[in-house]
């Protein structure tokens, strides 16, 4: 007599389906499907074997009653009518069935995992609720702040910024004046040179043949040098600076953007190449 597994395998082949096709439809593991067809399922409860066979039959479009000898349709829970003594018919829920099966496996503690999951989920929800409340409170406080207070704060900041700016400008002006006065101070001997930058200017300067300055003189800066015999200087932008030679201030040595090289300063004055 043909077994249930052989009959299902035969029907599957007749419908042109592979065992993988049945697996995709039923989501039953391939090893279990193969065991059903070979009548080799021995480690599962008969209840689950019947459930797998039922799914197999449905995937093939067959009636489970033809392949399960004591097949019964599951009873659906229904409530008794009010005032009726008719008993309520119910069966084990899917959750209870799965939970019972999971508990049968050693090492799996469903209750503990479920409790931990619920606790973590509850903490996340409480945290989100608190965060939303705090955010709303901050936004409401900003929105309800009187405009007058905002204006006062803004005005105070603006006044403080202007005072600091004026103070810095005064310091810079004083520094330039001090530098000019130092450059114009009479010297005991040897040439003296002072440079006052109105714009950035690259300066290369030698004192008695020794290179002592080779850098950019920034806008608003000034420098002074003195030598025994002579000073040689080159400027990237002669129109960007004023020079003070031996205490005498001289206007720009060239046009804006004009470079000047090898300017010589001695105690007798300035000479251009």
Image (cartoon, rainbow, N blue to C red):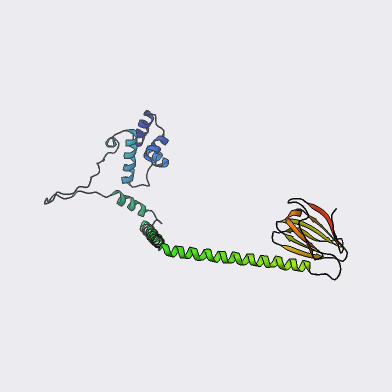
Query: Which residue is pictured at 73% across the width and 63% down the height?
Result: 222
| Left/right of residue 130 with respect to residue 76 in the rendered view | right
Q: Quadrant of residue 192?
A: bottom right
Query: Which residue is pictured at 71% across the width and 67% down the height?
Result: 177
Q: Position of residue 19 (x, y in %)?
A: 41, 35
Query: Which residue is pictured at 75% across the width and 59% down the height?
Result: 242
Q: Could you tell me if residue 39 is visible in this image?
A: no
Q: Is residue 40 above or below residue 241?
A: above
Q: How many marks?
A: 0
Query: Which residue is pictured at 74% across the width and 57% down the height?
Result: 241
| Left/right of residue 82 with respect to residue 227 in the rendered view | left
| Left/right of residue 258 with respect to residue 28 in the rendered view | right
Q: Position of residue 162 (x, y in %)?
A: 56, 64
Q: Is residue 174 above or below residue 43?
A: below
Q: Position of residue 179 (x, y in %)?
A: 74, 66
Q: Nearer the viewer, residue 116 or 3?
A: 116
Q: Nearer the viewer, residue 131 or 190?
A: 190
Q: Could you tell me if residue 175 is visible in this image?
A: yes
| Left/right of residue 211 with respect to residue 113 in the rendered view | right
Q: Quadrant of residue 1?
A: top left
Q: Position of residue 95 (x, y in %)?
A: 31, 51
Q: Is residue 150 above or below residue 255?
A: below
Q: Nearer the viewer, residue 165 or 82?
A: 165
């Amino acid at each position: 007599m043909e077994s249930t597994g052989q009959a299902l395998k035969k029907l599957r082949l007749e419908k042109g389906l592979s065992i993988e096709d049945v697996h995709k439809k039923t989501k039953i593991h391939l090893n279990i499907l193969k065991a059903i067809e070979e009548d080799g399922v021995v480690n599962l409860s008969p209840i689950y074997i019947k459930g797998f066979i039922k799914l197999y039959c449905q995937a093939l479009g067959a009636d489970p009653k033809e392949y399960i000898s004591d097949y019964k349709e599951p009873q659906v829970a229904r409530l008794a009518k009010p005032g009726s003594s008719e008993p309520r018919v119910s069966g084990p829920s899917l959750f209870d069935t799965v939970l019972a099966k999971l508990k049968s496996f050693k090492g799996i503690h469903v209750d503990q995992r479920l409790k931990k999951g619920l606790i973590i989920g509850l903490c996340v929800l409480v945290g989100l609720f608190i965060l939303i409340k705090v955010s709303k409170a901050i936004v409401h406080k900003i929105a309800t702040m009187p405009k007058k207070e905002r204006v006062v704060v803004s005005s105070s900041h603006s006044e403080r910024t202007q005072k600091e700016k004026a103070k810095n400008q005064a310091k810079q002006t004083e520094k330039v004046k001090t530098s000019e006065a130092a450059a114009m101070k009479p010297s005991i001997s040897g040439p003296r040179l002072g440079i006052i930058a109105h714009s950035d200017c690259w300066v290369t300067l030698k004192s008695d043949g020794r290179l002592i300055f080779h850098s950019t003189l920034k806008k608003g800066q000034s420098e002074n040098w003195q030598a025994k015999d002579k000073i040689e200087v080159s400027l990237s932008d002669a129109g960007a600076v004023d020079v003070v030679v031996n205490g005498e201030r001289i206007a720009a040595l060239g046009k804006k953007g004009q470079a000047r090289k090898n300017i010589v300063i001695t105690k007798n004055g300035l000479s251009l190449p």
